[in-house]
Image (cartoon, helix red, strand yellow):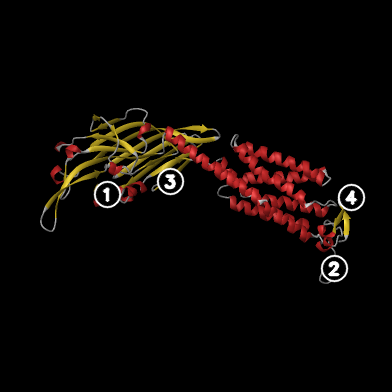
Amino acid sequence: MPWKRLSQNGSPVPELAFNPIVKILLIAGLALALLIPLALVQDLVGEREDRLRQVVREIGDLWGRPQTLAGPLLLVPASRVQVDEQGRRTRLEEQLVLLPDVYHVEAALEPERRSRGPFEAVVYRLNLKLTGHFSLPGRPDRALKGVQPDWTRARLLLGLEDQRRLTEAPEIVWDERGLAAEPGLPSDLAALTAGGLQAELNLGPDDFGRPLTFATSLTLNGSSHLDVLPLGRTTSATIASTWPHPSFYGAFLPLEREVSDEGFTARWSTSHFGRSYPQIWRLGEAGGVRMEDLRASAFGVELYQPAGAYQQSERTTKYGLLFILFTFTLLFLYELISRRRLHIFQYGLVGCALALFYLLLLALAEQLTFALAYAIAAGAVVAQLVFYTAGALDSLNRAAGLGLLVAALYAGLYLLIGLEDLALLVGGLALFVALTAVMAVTRRIDWYAIAQGTKTDPNAEETRSSDVPAGG
């Protein structure tokens, strides 16, 4: 094999090493091989994120699970007579569910942070105030056609996802008299919420034909989010907190909301026309109302943590291959415009440094803020690249120039991952600009001359068309 040139230490280099096509193929193969460590880092990010979710659940079990508010509602024992084909009469025992006419919720969330090692969860203390009224349907003996309710055994129920986290005994006022509340819900309503409160009412004839008011104040712990079921014929809710990043979701969005760095206030107002279940029904399959239908009508708010460390790390690793390709392109261009030739092993070390950045970022982000972790990891990798390429290129100025370009890439990536809605647009435009810059630098390079071992000057004036051989 002919030997065309000498390497930087004077050793002969085979002619094939200067073939640009061969070099590009080797660089492309190396970049694809570096997808393996990038994939391992992505798997590690996913593993740590799963661990974070596990810790959030564990802290929620200890402090208070995400709360769901269902009620209050009335549960009334009833009976009806069923006649079969032979005329035999059977008395069936049932339960009637009666929802309030007017239902108003005032909730104040006091957020707190709880951590276990590097993992952090958002919990809250909920100050809750419920008011409204019920209207019983007609006279006691004509409440429902074919059904005889026993109003004397009616109970007031309030569903809570985790009533264990009540910090004090609740006070329930029914028609201007206090009620003694007991924990627990009937098993038929267990699918609605995991727990709750109940109180005996002992309704009588005097309770018909007028609104029966209720009011209660609760203080309990919860985590992550709060759900409210719109059980009233008219339901209104106000939720306020000092948390600056709310995420509203569910079957209804707030009619009004005010969000600032000091917190948020949101207001909902709905009617029974916006849900799929009536004001009164028989509990069980005969009533045709499923607990899933009630839960599907819920609305609420989540104390959202925007772009956490793991989410931002995951977004960053998605650009890993582009980073490697862009840096390799810069090194290749340095080869074209200088007398120095870089071995594919040297490209490999640079690629390993770029892949190591994502592992450093993940490790530091668990201990520091993401911005500080990103700055330290990027600064360390850029310094490492300048140190190495200064010797490989035998030029501190060129190494510093490469370092500045890579630092600019890291700065651009940091801005890009913060643009949730415009990331695709800005990223596409950045790639277009980068490709244009590469095309501008290489547009006067004679690739045939490089393949033949002849040095070309990309900054030289363009050869006149009359001097170019046909087919060249």
| x, y percent for residue 314 | 58, 46
Judged from this view, the residue extending furthest toward the front is 1
Q: Quadrant of residue 388?
A: top right
Residue matched to label 3: 249
Q: Which mark is residue 278?
A: 1
Q: Position of residue 317 (x, y in %)?
A: 62, 47
User: In the rendered structure, which disc, 1 or 4, sits on the residue that comes first in sequence?
Assistant: 4
Q: Secondary structure at mark 3?
A: strand
Question: Considering depth in this image, is 3 or 228 the residue closer to the camera?
Answer: 3
**Residue extending furthest toward the left:** 87
| Front disc: 4 or 2 | 4
* Residue type (three-letter) at the residue carrying disc 1: Pro
Q: Residues within 10 Å of mark 4 (few under 14, many from 20)?
A: few
Is any part of residue 307 visible from this angle? no
- Of the two numbered discs 3 and 1 on the same chain, state the one appearing first in sequence: 3
Q: CA distance from mark 1 to mark 4?
A: 90 Å
